[in-house]
Image (cartoon, helix red, strand yellow):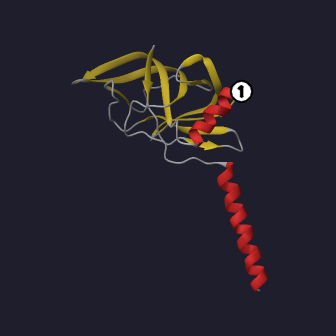
Amino acid sequence: MEHIRIAADLHVNEKANTVEGIAWPYNGKPDRAGDIINKGAIRSAVTELPMLLEHKTQQLIGLWTQIEDRNEGLYVRGHFNETILAKGVRSQILTGRRNGLSIAFREKSARRNGRYKVITDLEVFECSICESPMNPDSRLTRVKTLDQAEALAAAIKRAAVALNLKG
């Protein structure tokens, strides 16, 4: 089993206790290990994957319940469990300490393309939340939080009150 760390466009919805993102972008660029995975390489239908911390099987922090092979990459959406560890990881994501996704997979077939390996068929075993992704182009771009929504709602209420006072 190979561990490949790739992160992209990871979102957290704190109220719903969910996280989503692109676990492997289909941008044709190799990761630091020289592996390239293109759309269509994940041929086995996957309905659920364990959500681990840094590929450690003893650190299960949730479950990926939506896995889709989209044009932009391997999309995953899941929810955190209610453990202290999972709550801590969610907090680290919200503060920017952890911003990566990484898949663990078994390569079924591949071909060489110069110094790179193009993986043409693979089986994904799990998707981890990690601190340091292998693909330097793949980073967290946005985090959705309940605090941001509440701050926006409070600002709207203050503005409404101010408008009513002037009215």
In the displayed orientation, state which residue is furthest to the top: 1
Position of 156 compared to 137: left or right?
Answer: right
Position of residue 66 relative to residue 12, above or below, is above
Total labels drawn: 1
Residue 153 location, x and y as percent? 71, 62
Position of 46 compared to 159: left or right?
Answer: left
From the image, which quarter does the N terminus lie in? Answer: top left
Residue 14 location, x and y as percent? 68, 43
**Secondary-structure class at tag 1:** loop
Residue 157 location, x and y as percent? 75, 68
In the displayed orientation, state which residue is furthest to the bottom: 167
Residue at 74% of width from left, 74% of height from top? Answer: 160
Figure quadrant of residue 2: top left
Amino acid type at circle 1 is Thr
Residue 12 location, x and y as percent? 61, 42
- Residue that mark 1 sits on: 83
Residue at 64% of width from left, 26% of height from top? Answer: 61
Position of 32 compared to 165: left or right?
Answer: left
Residue at 71% of width from left, 45% of height from top? Answer: 15
From the image, which quarter does the C terminus lie in? Answer: bottom right
Question: In this orientation, which residue lies closer to the viewer: 156 or 2?
Answer: 156
Q: Residues within 10 Å of mark 1 (few under 14, many from 20)?
A: few
